[in-house]
Amino acid sequence: MLRAILTGLCCVCFSVPAGAQPYRAINWLYVVPVSQNSFEVIDDGRSSAKDFWCAGSDYARAFGLDGVRKRLYILDPLGDSKTTAGAKGVVFTVSPDDAMKNTPSSYSVSVKRRNENLAISHAYNFCDTLLDGVFGRF
């Protein structure tokens, strides 16, 4: 009986909308598609700004949304999730509107301001891999 209750509770707590298949990024954060060119990185409760950028860039690379000099833009800063009930998230896009395109390149690593942007290749450098822990970065 307890197992059934816990299973049901987990299903409710970690639910995502039907049809939106989450992707597990290299740093174990979930990324949920919002539209063809936008997606939301879900906070796991201990994520740093670099973790969000890493997961976003990993998703963009995995689904072919990266390209020469492509950038990630924050469409919706850290706040209540658009795709997962009871969670926090950041919505990124690779197709900015004209106002976003005119935003200067970012030197800070923040997920609290709309229009912040980084090159996908730059953001991917925030991803730590298993080999980095063993051998260090060169």
Image: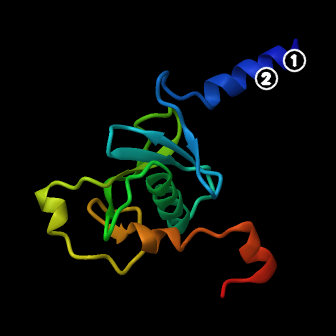
Name the residue type under label 1. Leu
Up/down of 64 relative to 99, above or below: above
* Labels 1 and 2 touching (C-beta < 8 A): yes
Q: Secondary structure at mark 1?
A: helix
Q: Quadrant of residue 78?
A: bottom left
Residue lying at 47% horizontally and 23% vertically, measured from the top left: 19
Circle number at residue 6: 2
**Quadrant that contains the C terminus:** bottom right
Q: Residue at x 27, y 76 (%)?
A: 105
Residue 69 in the image: state x and y as whole percent: 31, 71
Q: Residues within 10 Å of mark 1 (few under 14, many from 20)?
A: few
Left or right, 21 with respect to 60, comes to: right
Q: Please rate how many residues cluster around mark 2, counting C-alpha atoms within 10 Å: few if below 14, some from 14 to 19, many from 20.
A: few
Look at label 2 and name its amino acid.
Answer: Leu
| Res. 7 image quadrant | top right
Please indicate whether residue 9 sits to the left or right of residue 112 in the image. right
State whether residue 52 is above or below residue 24. Answer: below
Q: Which residue is mark 1?
A: 2
For the point 49% across and 21% down, the residue is 18
